[in-house]
Image: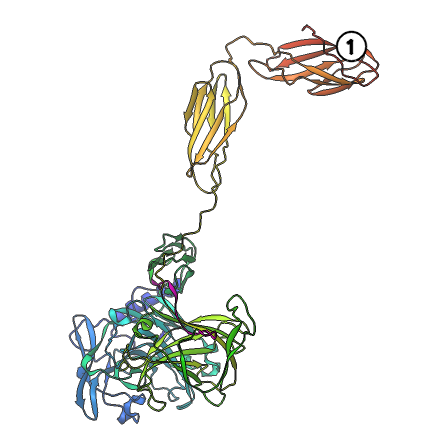
Amino acid sequence: MLRSATRLLSGTALLSVSVLAAGAAQAQNCPSATPVWADEFSGTAVDQTRWEMITGDGCAEGICGWGNNELQSYRAQNATVSDGTLKITAKSENFGNSAYTSARMRTASMTNGGEWTHGRFEARIKMPDAPGMWPAFWMLPTNPDLPWPQSGEIDIVESTGRNPETIYGTLHYGQPWPDNQFTGNPMRKMPDTWADGFHTYAVEWTPNEIKWFADDVLYSTKTPADLGNPAFWTFENYAYHFILNLAVGGSLGGAVDNAALPGVMEVDYVRVYDYGPPALSGPHITKPDEPATYSIVSEKGSNSTYSWTAPTGETGTGSSFTVNWEATSGPVNLTVTNSCGTYNLSMDVHVQPRLAKESILEDHEGGGNLTYTAMDGTYERPVSNPAPDAVNGTSQVGRYTRNGAVQYDFIAGDTSLIPDAAEFVDGNKVFFLDVYTDAPVGTEILVQLENNQTALPSNYPVGRHSKYVAYTETQSGWQRLAFELQERINLDTGDNDVTSVFLLIAPGTANNDVYYLDNFDIYGPDTSPPPPPPPPPPNEPPESKWWYNCDGLTCNFNGENSLDTDGNVVSHFWSFEPGASGFGATKTHTFSGPGTYRPFLTVKDDDGAKTTKRRTVTVSDPNAPNLPPENKWWSRCDGLTCDFVAKQSFDPDGQIVSYFWKFESGVPGQYGTPTTYTFSAPGEYRVLLTLKDDDDAKTKKTRTITVSAAASDASISDATGE
């Protein structure tokens, strides 16, 4: 799967090991723990058989400022190796025409360097957090036949010192500058930043797909379909080399804080694998009291078993796992075992604080705290709500029509409700806005915080503090948007300097779309007690199930089939006869004598609920003489038709197996109880019942029955047994 240039590996021994590892991995499609190329930075200097040091300010290449208005000049001595890491240091010092120095290095065309098409490419890096720093780990094609960006660029990871909580994974492609294009995704870290420690950044590149990972968490996937014109996907045509550099300032780095220098980008290692390990996908920042689903991705192998855990105490055994988050952050862990091995994966998840509405910027009902100062479009307020619903049922809202002649259409207003903008940067406060529009799903809306004394239309980014982004999620229906930090724009604008709020609707577009707006609010930490947990479902009582078998007077009783559908059976209590009882799922009892008994089993579940089941058990003593059955019966007549019942008959040491009735001479008798018989004529009859037990003992009982043609009850005479 991995295609590399001829200078991929440094020697015969390493080549043979890597090929064997790659061959074994390909045979099973399993990731190998051995990289096919690596620099562990274990020496005392940069290995210049692997890395070429790029120097200068870009002017010699015809792109002064390296095409991005960068402020540094690169020097080889700014890249050092010690204590097992590479350190690229940006310094405030004059060199040539630059006021700063730093380092840039690449693996292209080096004896032991490398260029690759497809594979997993990763580095473990500690980012700098000094304002103005712009670290990058990226890839360019070696000696392509087309210029940049037609031949492509893969940015594995970029970050900035002014926004150290955000990393970016990006593709560059398309037509030559200035018609070049790019696409990518950020990944934000909370509550700390990416600069607070080492993290592993990687891409996995397979034919026509590139995935981005941070600490083995998938956060972006791109295919040719994401480029608008799939023909711009030229990445498969070239072998790409690595670049590590730390830029100063520039279009992404922003203003430099000299007092925070030197800034250091520290690299533990750079590695190339044929396949990547399994990873996790799912939200690493989530809201409280909401579910979130996590799944395994990039999994190789077969016959997988999964074991998930979460801080909530929930566990799972499937390839995906839903966590019902409450208010506590923590790791979601997965152990997966399959034909490729055992992998332990973990994702740190930050649960944002519970929020409650703190103040109102605009509600179109007289409760706003925003004084409008400028706008590009037309803002009618108040107007009637076009479609009241559960999200927004108010009667009055605002109607804003964009100015199609302005790409960055805005609504601006002053407010005193933001004394400390750091609370929004940290995520402890959030802007919310109700929006109703026919604009496409995914339309961008920005909230930008500024200082109205220093920010001018012509001096961006001066006076701009930060901006927050949300994207529409539906058309022709109200939606409640929450805004997340997109960028801390200018660190010279302090957290206490914000006086104005700008709302930018569909920035970078030119249309006259209409947006209904309402309930522009600020939410802060919810200090009220958390909602009580929902009541548990009513307890289902256990089910008492038991069976028995007897040998003479001794019986074995078994209640192991008793069950509790919503818990566990914790107790089995037996009662066999007066004075004889006991606990246990199984019991043996010898009855005091032959006869019929009514033992019962009471089971109790883990919620204290009880259920009792009683059954009839008849036992006999095999060593005692057989006792004949006792014959008891009665009748009731209506005219010539009589009902005969012998249910009270019983056998003291066994069971009755036969009931035989004889009603009148010359007429065959009949079996069973109860039974019905119609006599041939009115008169007196001697009715005989013969009982037989399971030892063939018989008892007969005759009674006189008087019947008449008219409907009446016959009297029951006292008859003697025969």
User: How busy is the neighbourhood of tag 1: few (under 14 within 10 Å), some, or many (20 plus)?
Assistant: some
Q: Quadrant of the N terminus?
A: bottom left
Q: Residue furthest front?
A: 366
Asked whether residue 270 is in view, the answer is no
Give SS at disc 1: strand
The colour scheme used to paint the residues is: rainbow
Horizontal side, residue 620 vs residue 500: left or right: right
Horizontal and vertical percent for residue 562?
A: 48, 34
User: In this image, 695 relative to 425: left or right?
Assistant: right
Q: Which residue is mark 1?
A: 685
- Image coords of residue 57 (percent x, y): 25, 90
Magenta stretch in the rendered image = 349-366
Is residue 378 shown above or below 210?
below
- Return the residue nearer the eye: 244 or 406: 406
In the depicted view, which residue is nearer to us: 203 or 237? 203
Q: Is residue 354 magenta?
A: yes
Residue 168 highlighted magenta (yes or no): no
Q: In which quadrant is the C terminus drawn?
A: top right
Q: Is residue 538 above or below residue 446?
A: above
Q: Residue at x 79, y 17 (%)?
A: 712
Majority secondary structure of the magenta segment? Answer: strand
Asked which quadrant contains residue 93, the reply is: bottom left
Horizontal and vertical percent position of residue 107: 27, 80
Name the residue type under label 1: Tyr
Query: Residue 488: which quarter of the image?
Result: bottom left
Is residue 178 visible from the viewing direction of this image? yes
Residue 129, compared with residue 300, is above or below; it is below
Count of numbered badges drawn on the protein: 1
The picture places residue 548, in percent across and down from the top left corner, at 50, 25
